[in-house]
Image: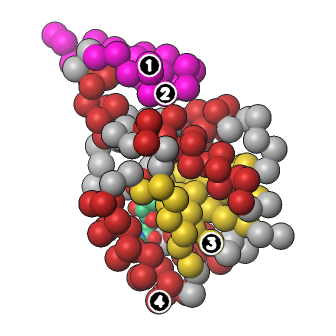
Amino acid sequence: MSRAVCPGSFDPVTHGHLDVIERTGRLFEEVVVAVGNNISKNALFTPQERVDMLTEACAEWTNVRVALFDGLLVEFCGAHSIDVIVKGLRFASDFDYELQMAQMNRELTGVDTVFMPTAPRWSYVSSTLIREIAGLGGDVSAFLPPPTAERTLRRVTDRQGRKSP
Ligand code: PNS
């Protein structure tokens, strides 16, 4: 069985992520969406909350499952018999960093990476911008699945409530 992984932080999952996951599901028999923790980012949701939101958002695609991972992505790939890492590319500057990781991952265990251009309509969307806009009171509902948008609004509202005296 051909099996690919779509790894990421998904904090939170956006329509851009879901576009890449759906298209990966048309190319491979099985897709594992692997939720990792990017320690350099200030997380809005716990890894388990992100898994829950992704599981709901991907429910209609029967060949897609969602899993948590920590540690090295290549080890996760080995443990789950995953042949290919699929990464979405939004713009040229994504490529520089992703190429380096792809080459390193291939050197580590031989696992290959395939790049998928994101749909132009979502190419400017990133979870980092979503967190910033939502945190400053902006409307991010156009970029997220509705249940994720609701949870994002609730989370930033809760956090702001806790910060105010
Ligand atoms: O959505 P992100 O934040 O770009 O996802 C990054 C992620 C989690 C996919 C990346 O940080 C990752 O692969 N982390 C696992 C640790 C690892 O394998 N590091 C070595 C990379 S060569």
Asked if 86 appears above or below 54 in the picture, the reply is below
Tag 1 residue: 141
For the residue marked with disc 4, what is the amino acid? Glu
- Res 28 label: none
Instruction: For mark 3, give the secondary structure.
Output: strand
Please identify the residue farthest to the left as the structure is shown. Answer: 165
Query: Which of the pair 81/91 is nearer the observer?
Result: 91
Upstream in the sequence, badge 3 or badge 1? 3
Contact (CB < 8 A) between labels 4 and 1?
no
For the residue marked with disc 3, what is the amino acid? Val
**x and y, in percent, of residue 103 in the image:** 42, 82
Instruction: For mark 2, give the secondary structure.
Output: loop
**x and y, in percent, of residue 87 in the image:** 50, 60
Where, quadrant-wise, is the C terminus in this rendering? top left
- Res 144 label: 2
For the residue marked with disc 1, what is the amino acid? Ser
Tag 3 residue: 84
Q: Indicate left or right for 84 with 160 as reference.
A: right
Q: From mark 1 to mark 2, how far is it between C-alphas?
A: 6 Å
Q: From mark 4 to mark 2, how far is it between C-alphas?
A: 35 Å
Contact (CB < 8 A) between labels 4 and 2?
no
For label 4, count other residues whose C-alpha is less than 10 Å away and answer few (under 14), some (14-19) or many (20+): few
x 44%, y 19%: residue: 141
